[in-house]
Amino acid sequence: MCLLLNVKKKNELIQVKGSKFMYVWMAVFYLGGLISCLILIIDGFKFNSTYSLIYILGGIMLAPVFLYLTLWSLPAFNPGKILLTIILGENGKVFSKKGAVFINNIQNTDLVRNPINLINYVVIETFDEKRIKIPTYNLLSDLDYQVMVDQYLFPYMTENARKVWDRKIDLNVLLKEVRYERQEQKID
């Protein structure tokens, strides 16, 4: 099973949260980037090196980028942040603050990176032309997302949605990388 997927199960209710490893990774990256820019600017203004102007320019140019990325990711740092909730079963649902959709109404699902804020979103398209974009704040890796969909949503999807999902993933990669094997489940 995937070690980074943070799932809390209560009977038929599944709450997907960000992994603790990804929280630490994000904090180190964003805060480290901001602190590094600040150190570059301070060290550059001492003019102790022939590279002082490069330090100042680099720090000034990169500080807004790291600040921008940090501000976009701040909502992820709410304690106990639940990215999405899944109710299993024939009339199962996927819901978050952005909306809810029945699992058997899912036509397609993807993990998409927004090019402006660099945050991954779970995008769910339904048969009735509805699109729900659920921000993951990069707390859910690609492999974790694939395991989550394959384990919890796949058994309850329609046959066409299953075929689309099977074309997107490689079960051999999931087996090799995260030791996940699809369990054949019978649905009545």
Image (cartoon, helix red, strand yellow):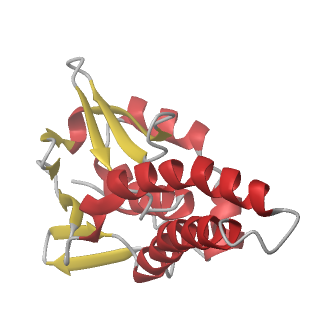
Q: Position of residue 58 (x, y in %)?
A: 69, 53
Q: Is there any visible trace of residue 107 in the rendered image?
A: yes
Query: Is residue 39 found left or right of 80 in the rendered image?
Result: right
Q: In which quarter of the image is residue 129?
A: top left
**Residue pictured at 46% horizontal, 34% vertical:** 116
For the question of whether residue 93 can be seen, the reply is no
Tally of numbered tags: 0
Res 27 → quadrant: bottom left
Apparent side of residue 48 relative to residue 124 in the rendered image (left or right)? right
Q: Residue furthest right?
A: 50
Q: Nearer the viewer, residue 145 or 154?
A: 145
Which residue is at the far front?
A: 47
5 to 148, vertically: above or below:
below
Q: Is residue 28 above or below residue 104?
A: below
Q: Position of residue 173 (x, y in %)?
A: 70, 61
* Residue occupying the point 21% across, 66% down: 82
Residue nearer the viewer, 90 or 170: 170
Q: Position of residue 130 (x, y in %)?
A: 21, 23
Q: Which of 167 and 33 is in front in this view?
A: 33
Instruction: Give left or right: position of 70 versus 102.
Output: right
Q: Which residue is painted at 54% across and 68% down in the image?
A: 38
* Image x and y of residue 139, in percent: 41, 64
